[in-house]
Every structure is written in structure tokens, then in C-alpha cells.
């Protein structure tokens, strides 16, 4: 048998081996996505001591689905413990994995603002991303369009710094901007607000972690003006205490 014949035979055997190895990988990937998983996480569930409304605030998410497609529910808001005012947001999203650690999401968002005066509700379309950037920063950028054509955007980021196996420090930032002024929701055009937080939590269990921290928030330009007209401060600092829980 010549060297060329041996080379062709070796190449043929290598190709067959690669094909045989690839088939179970593809099959296992297909089987993997047939499993259904779920998660509910209250990333924030806290009392904020502001010296004013002293609200109870929350930021939660939940999802159900496989490795590549999921249905998400997200909610955040605050309820005053002094008066009857508050605001809440609920999102329903379809999500698709498009890259390692990154999902593209699309769906609807419903905002409600209530208080001593008339209640207000609006519906917005949502397109965004959910994922982990290099160095394990969790990022959540999104764009919103209301039923009236008002355009806004938000980016939320956080990072878990392990001080010990159970003690974690989480810096967190949220920034909102809008193209149009929407006075009934306290939204001005341009950069609306910046919310910074630093929370220290202790994981009694992975699923159950009380925390303490500080929060600083600042409204800008037209949003600050609308806040002052409503009797609120443009800048707000608070001590926070709460629990992070998931199941």
C-alpha cells in the first residue's frame, strides 16, 4: 500500500470519526433544549428610608423555558409607606439566546402611576438585551415605544463582588432617558434620572440573602422640574434594608 493510499484511508477514517462525534453533540443539544426550567428572583425587595415617602421598592424577574427560548416576566416599582402614592411596571417578554450569556428580548410593558390624584396607565413595546458582559457585569439595556409613539430607553447594570463565600457587595446603576416629555408619568425629554446603589448582603442560603445598603438618585432637566412641581425632591438619598430571594 502506497503512502498516498494510506493518507487517503487515514483521512477517510478521521472524517468518519468526526462525523460520529458530531452526531451525539447535535442530538444532545436538541435534547437539552427540550427541558423546561424556571426561576423567580426578587433581586431587590427593600424598605428605603428617605425622610419623605419612605417607600417599599421591588425589582423582580421570572422566566420559564429552555436553553434557547424563554418567556420572561419583569416587574419593578415602589409603594409609599406614608401616603397612598406609588408606581409599578410589568413586562412580558419573549426571549431568544443569540450569543453565549446574551438573550434578545421583545414584548410589552405596562406602567401604572397612582396616588392622591388621577391614576395613569400606558402600554409600551419593548426591545432589549439581557446578559453578562466581560468580567461578569450583568447588563440590561432596553428601548421602549409607547402607544402614542413616545420613545424612551433604560440601561441597568450590576456586579456581585464576593468578599467571602457568603458576604457580597453589589454596586448597581440604573439610567433612564426619553425623547419626548410625558408629564403624567413625571418624564421629561433628555436624560431623566440616574439611580446608584451599593448593597451589602449575606447569603444565609444561596436563595435567601438579607442586605443593607445606601442609594442615591438624581433627576435631571425636565424630569427634575416635574418632580418639584409634584412636591418631590430632584435629588434623593436613602438607607435601604431588604432581602434578595429566589426560587
Image (spheres, helix red, strand yellow):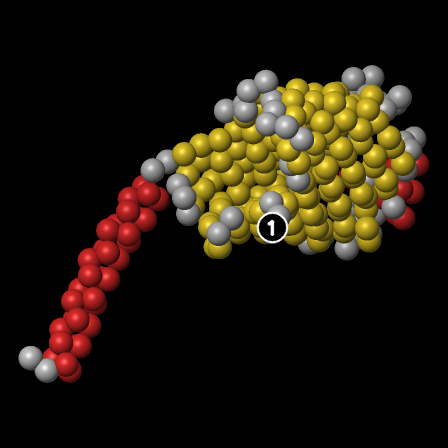
Left or right: residue 222 compared with residue 209: right
Q: Please name whichever residue, 92 or 26, is drawn nearer the observer in this view of the structure.
A: 26
The structure residue drawn at horizontal position 86% and vertical position 30%, both measured from the top left corner, is 237
Residue 55 location, x and y as percent?
78, 23
Residue 121 location, x and y as percent?
69, 36
Left or right: residue 32 compared with residue 199: left
Left or right: residue 229 compared with residue 142: right
Q: Secondary structure at mark 1?
A: strand
Residue 169 location, x and y as percent?
70, 32
Q: Please name whichever residue, 137 or 163, is drawn nearer the observer in this view of the structure.
A: 163
Mark 1 = which residue? 133
Residue 56 location, x and y as percent?
73, 22
Picture quarter with the N terminus: bottom left
The structure residue drawn at horizontal position 51% and vertical position 38%, both measured from the top left corner, is 72
Q: Is residue 112 above or below residue 219?
A: above
Residue at the outermost left position: 1
Amino acid at each position: 500500500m502506497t503512502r498516498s493510499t494510506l493518507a487517503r484511508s487515514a483521512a477517510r477514517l478521521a472524517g468518519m470519526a468526526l462525523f460520529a462525534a458530531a452526531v451525539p453533540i447535535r442530538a444532545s443539544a436538541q435534547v437539552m433544549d427540550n427541558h423546561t426550567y424556571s426561576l423567580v428572583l426578587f433581586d431587590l425587595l427593600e424598605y428605603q428610608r428617605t425622610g419623605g415617602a419612605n417607600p417599599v421598592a421591588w425589582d423582580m424577574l421570572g422566566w420559564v423555558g429552555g436553553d434557547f427560548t424563554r418567556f420572561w416576566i419583569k416587574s419593578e416599582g415602589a409603594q409609599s409607606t406614608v401616603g397612598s402614592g406609588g408606581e409599578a411596571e410589568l413586562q412580558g417578554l419573549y426571549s431568544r439566546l443569540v450569543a453565549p450569556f446574551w438573550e434578545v428580548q421583545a414584548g410589552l410593558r405596562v406602567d401604572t402611576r397612582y396616588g392622591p390624584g388621577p391614576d395613569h396607565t400606558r402600554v409600551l413595546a419593548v426591545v432589549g438585551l439581557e446578559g453578562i458582559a466581560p468580567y461578569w457585569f450583568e447588563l440590561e439595556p432596553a428601548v421602549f415605544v409607547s402607544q402614542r409613539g413616545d420613545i424612551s430607553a433604560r440601561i441597568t447594570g450590576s456586579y456581585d463582588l464576593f468578599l467571602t463565600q457568603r458576604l457580597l457587595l453589589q454596586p448597581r446603576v440604573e439610567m433612564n432617558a426619553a425623547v419626548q416629555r410625558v408629564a403624567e408619568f413625571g418624564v421629561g425629554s433628555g436624560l431623566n434620572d440616574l439611580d446608584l446603589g451599593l448593597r451589602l448582603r449575606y447569603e444565609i442560603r444561596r436563595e435567601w440573602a438579607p442586605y443593607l445598603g445606601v442609594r442615591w438618585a438624581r433627576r435631571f432637566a425636565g424630569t427634575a422640574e416635574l418632580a418639584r412641581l409634584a412636591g418631590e425632591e430632584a435629588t434623593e438619598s436613602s438607607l435601604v434594608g431588604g432581602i434578595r430571594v429566589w426560587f
